[in-house]
Image (tube, rainbow, N blue to C red):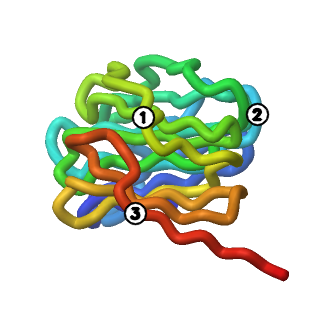
Amino acid sequence: MSLDSGRTANSVFGRYGHAFSFDTGNSVGEIIGHNKVINACAIRNQRPFRAATCSDDMTVNFYHGPPYKWQKSMTDHTRFVQCVRFSPDGQFVISVGSDAKIFLYDGSTGDKIAEITDGAHAGGIFSMSWSPDSKQFMTSSADMTVKIWDLAERKAIKYVVQRYD
């Protein structure tokens, strides 16, 4: 489930989901377009509202709404896409995946801006999270590292390695 400023909630089950008004429970869109399980869903909480989903089908889907309607699929990843998140200011959306890739998209149009490769992880990336000012983000990976990235420079600036003996 993902919330946007208390207005809309998304509920995803398997390959499908629904966007509904949190206040009334009325449907405000359908989450469609994936052919395998959906791993994450995010909502842009600024106007114009947008939603993004990612899936084991190696795609990131972008929706306009409400009512939320499918707009496009991005097929940049080569393995499962594990996480997708809009920046707090709504300007960007990032996807990360089992292919250890990070893609930066425009938060309003869904157009790809860049693949972020400087300081790349050596293993699949499980999750990411934004800093409150939208200037940095953090990723966690199967390579047992957590990295902090600078968005303007598009490179990793700090990392923590966890080793288990």
Q: Nearer the viewer, residue 69 or 74?
A: 74
Horizontal and vertical percent position of residue 34: 66, 28
Residue type, numbered disc 2: Lys
Q: Which amino acid type is shown beneath numbered disc 3?
A: Lys
Sequence-first tag of 2 and 1:
2
Q: How far is mark 2 from mark 1, CA to CA?
A: 26 Å
- Nearer to us of marks 2 and 1 is 1
State how far apart marks 3 and 1 are (Cα). Answer: 15 Å
Amino acid at pointer 1 = Ile
Q: Is residue 39 visible?
A: no
The answer for how far apart the CA atoms under marks 2 and 3 are is: 34 Å
* Residue 116, disc: 1
Q: Quadrant of the C terminus?
A: bottom right
| Other residues around mark 1 within 10 Å, as few (<14) / some (14–19) / many (≥20) | some
Q: Say whether residue 38 is left or right of residue 6.
A: right
Q: Which mark sits nearer the N-terminus, 2 or 3? A: 2
Residue carrying label 3? 158
Circle on res. 128: none
